Image (cartoon, rainbow, N blue to C red):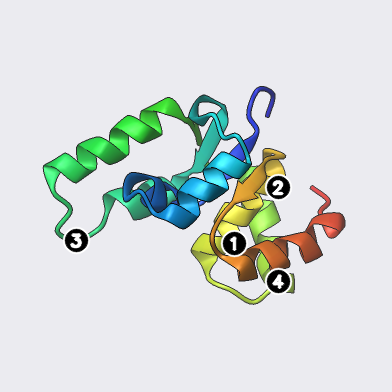
C-alpha cells in the first residue's frame, strides 16, 4: 500500500501504550512514524475487546489507532491467510495479521519472533 511502511502487531500497539522499553526501542530502531503505519482488523478487535477495559484505556487505544491506517480483511487477505495457515501452524489471528502484512506489502513489527520466522519462510511462496 503506497505511503505506508509498517503493520503494527497487537503486541506492539499494547507496548507503545504501556511504554514497554522493548517496544519503544523497536519503534526507535525502525524510525516509526505512526502516520505511516497500518493495523489489522484483528488488532483492532483484540485491542478493544479486552474484558474490563476502562473508558480511558479505550480512548488511548483509539487515539493511537486514529493516527494509523485501518487495513480491512478483504478477499486477498483471506486467500493469503488460508495459504499461510495451510503451510504454517499457528493461531488464526496471527495468520490474519501475517497475511495482512503480505497483501499490503508492509513490514510486520511484532514481538512474536515465531511469527516473524514463519512469515519469512512463507513470504517467498506467496502468490495471490
Badge 2 marks a residue whose secondary structure is helix
Query: Residue 59 placed where, x, y %?
Result: 21, 36
Q: Is residue 1 above or below residue 114?
A: above
Q: Is residue 47 above or below residue 114?
A: above
User: Nearest the camera: 101 or 27?
Assistant: 27
Compare marks 3 and 2 and give the one earlier in the sequence. Answer: 3
Query: Residue 98 placed where, x, y %?
Result: 63, 55
Identify the residue at image location x=60%, y=34%.
31
Q: Is residue 29 left or right of residue 14?
A: right
Compare marks 4 and 2 and give the one earlier in the sequence. Answer: 4
Q: Do callouts 3 and 2 mark residues in contact (Cβ within 8 Å)?
A: no
Nearer the observer, disc 4 or disc 2?
Answer: 2
Crowd band around label 1 with a 10 angstrom C-alpha radius: few (<14), some (14–19), many (20+): many
Marks 4 and 2, how far apart at CA = 15 Å
Per the rendering, the mark at residue 86 is: 4
Compare marks 4 and 1 and give the one earlier in the sequence. Answer: 4
Q: Is residue 27 left or right of residue 5?
A: left
Query: Residue 73 placed where, x, y %?
Result: 54, 44
Marks 1 and 3, how far apart at CA = 23 Å
Give the residue number, with chain letter if any, for mark 2. 102
Marks 4 and 3, how far apart at CA = 31 Å
Compare marks 1 and 2 and give the one earlier in the sequence. Answer: 1
Give the residue number, with chain letter if any, for mark 3. 51
Per the rendering, the mark at residue 95 is: 1
Amino acid at each position: 500500500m503506497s505511503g505506508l511502511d509498517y503493520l503494527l502487531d497487537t503486541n506492539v500497539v499494547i507496548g507503545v501504550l504501556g511504554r514497554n522499553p522493548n517496544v519503544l526501542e523497536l519503534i526507535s530502531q525502525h524510525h516509526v512514524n505512526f502516520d505511516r503505519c497500518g493495523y489489522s482488523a484483528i488488532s483492532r478487535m483484540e485491542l478493544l475487546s479486552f474484558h474490563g477495559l476502562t473508558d480511558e484505556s479505550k480512548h488511548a487505544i483509539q487515539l493511537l489507532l486514529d493516527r494509523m491506517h485501518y487495513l480491512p480483511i478483504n478477499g486477498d487477505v483471506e486467500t493469503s491467510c488460508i495459504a499461510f495457515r495451510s503451510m504454517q501452524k499457528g493461531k488464526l489471528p496471527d495468520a490474519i495479521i501475517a497475511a495482512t502484512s503480505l497483501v499490503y506489502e508492509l513490514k510486520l513489527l511484532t514481538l512474536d519472533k515465531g511469527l516473524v520466522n514463519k512469515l519469512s519462510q512463507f513470504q517467498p511462496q506467496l502468490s495471490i
